[in-house]
Structure formats: C-alpha cells, structure tokens
Image (cartoon, grey):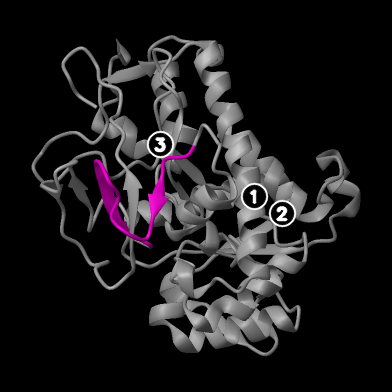
Amino acid sequence: MVKLQNVTPLDDEDLEKIGFSWHTDEDGSKYVADQLVQVTPTEAEAYYEAANTLYDMYVEAAEHVIENDLFFELGIPFNIVETIKKSWESDVHWHIYGRFDLAGGIDGQPIKLIEFNADTPTGLFETAVLQWALLKANGMDDAKQFNDVYKAIEANFRRLITLFDDTELFDERYDGWKVLFSSVEGLDEEEVTTRLLQQIATDAGFNTGFEFLQNVQFDEAGISDANEMEYEYWFKLYPWEDIGSDEGELAVILNEIMQNQKAIILNPAYTVLFQSKGMLKVLCELFPDSPYLLKTSDEPLDGAYVEKRHFGREGANTKIVDASGSVLAETDGPYENYKPVYQEYVDFAKDSEGNK
C-alpha cells in the first residue's frame, strides 16, 4: 500500500513566486496534492538501481536498432535517421535528462518498466523545485528526500565538456561555449521547464541564452538567436519525432548543422529511439529474463494488456483490455496515426482509499 504523509500546501501566490503558474486546473481543482508519497530507503535504492540498469539496457537496445536498421519498426521518421546516427557516433552528444515511469517497488512488489520519457519529459520542475519547496515549507530537512535531480542534471551539463572524466575538470576545459534554450511560445509549463534547465546550465558554468523556438535562426553557419548570436549548443523542448513528422525543412537543416559540426543539439536525436514505445518490444527480445520488463509485442497479447501508440503522450490513445478481449478503458487523442504496441497489464500500487 502507498503510504502518504499530509503536508501544508503552498498557496497560489507562493507557487507563482517560484514560477509554478499551472497550479490550478480548468475545473478549479489543484494540480498539486497536499500529500507526499513515503518510500523507505531500501525502496528508494531499488528504484535507483532499476533506473540505472534500465538505462544501460536502452543503450544496448539502441545500438541494436542502429546496427540492424530497425528505425521503421520503431516508427522513426525517415528524415531524422541520419541525424540519429550522427548523434550516436560521438560522446559529445550527451543525454541530459529523461524520466522512467515505473510500477511496483512498494510492499515487496517487483519494479516494472511502463515506459521511458527520454526526450521531452514533463514533471522536471515539480521534481527539482516543487518537492524541495514543499519540504522546506513543512519544516523538513533535505535528508527526507532522495531526489537530487537538480545536481544530477547540473553534472550532466558539465559532462558536455568533460565527458566521462571528473566533472571538476569543467573549469579548466570550458572555453566559453554557449547554450541556447528554446521552447514554444505560449506554453507556460514548457517555458518554465526550459528556463529551469537554462538556470541549471548557468549554475554548471555555461554562458546561456533563451529564445522562443519560433525566433531561432538556422543556417549553414549554425544556430543563432534573434540577435544573430551564434551558439555551440541548442536545447529545444520540442520532440524529435515532431521535427521529423511535422517540420521537414527544420529536420533537413538540423541534420546539415550536425553533419558539419556547427552545433550540438540537446537532448540528442538518438533519444527519440528511447522515446518510442516500440523499444519496449525490442527490450523484451534482447532481455527476455529481465525482472523489470513487461511482455510487449506488436500484436495483441493473450491475457490483459495495454495498447499504446509509439509516440503517444500523457495517456492519450490508450486502451486497457482484459483477458477476454473486452475494453475496460480507452482514451482518445492525437496520436492515432502512430503504430500500436501491446504491453502486458500490471496494476499500480494504491493508497488506503484505493487511489493509484
């Protein structure tokens, strides 16, 4: 059973002071609960070990996909394949952050991978800032929270320069390189998340800038902001699969920029391989004995399963089907054109009131 601890919530004014503007849903309900989930140190360590192991498995699976030209099977747009390969070839294309969605891990239940949001995951601001603020507001010290995502991402930015070496070497190797951060104008949550990442990169020691994606300039010289200042790195909170599917001209110029080594793009293009839920099937084929994986196929399974779309987001375009083939739940959404994948159903842990 999920154990909860009641806390005094931050009021709307305080939330807005720290940049959290999406605190209230359209129906007036609060986005942030007034409860925290409690896990034991042993459970936290098990999640940590699972995430690290799964990431290594994803890296091996991505290598398998690239070597065997399985991009179509993962629903990867053809016009970003060369960009993916280029980003995979060199360690300078460092994966900055992602989010595993996991089931189990509580009351002795096995941890199971649901999916990996590897390119443009949500929830970063809530994890890196809001959880910490709630602890502080309720008189708890930092030791109460296992999460150190802010410092971990800061270290990953420094690894853009030091790679696998000690991140303390950043200061002596850094040569003034700049990072431009971009999100789509008018999407508050995405802008706040992007500006948080900009702050983390600044703390890491980079020179940084921000420009809405619509105003970024791309040409044979590289990537620059509206004032024509060029940047060596560009972080975009915009999915690679959407660049391939909806922004063909941008896909071409980004490939040229990368092939000519004029800029490095974050998160790297290869993260779209991780992002595809088609990778769940590849993982099952490569690691059939892994305790973390749920059986996944590109055909409906025997027994209860969840049907998802390769690049579906936030639960859209999913079906839960029981062992008899009856649809228990179904959601609509804009991802119907992507290929389906079928994953063994697993229940989520519940609290004392039956909420998952």
- Bounds of the magenta segment: 293-310
Is 46 placed left or right of 232 in the picture? left
Sequence-first disc among 2 and 1? 1
68 to the left or right of 111: right
Of residues 306 and 38, the one drawn nearer to the viewer in this rendering: 306
Side (left or right) of 38 relative to 196: left
Residue depicted at 77% across the width and 65% down the height: 90
- Residue type at the position of mark 1: Ala
Residue 65: quadrant of the picture: bottom right
* Quadrant containing the C terminus in the rendered view: top left
Q: Main secondary structure of the magenta part?
A: loop
Q: Residue at x 69, y 78 (%)?
A: 258
Decide: few, some or many residues near mark 3? Use Cα within 10 Å; few <14, some 14-19, many ≥20: some
| Residue carrying label 3 | 126
Q: Which residue is mark 2?
A: 206
Percent position of residue 304, x then y: 24, 41
Q: Which residue is mark 1?
A: 201
Is residue 212 in view from this perspective?
no
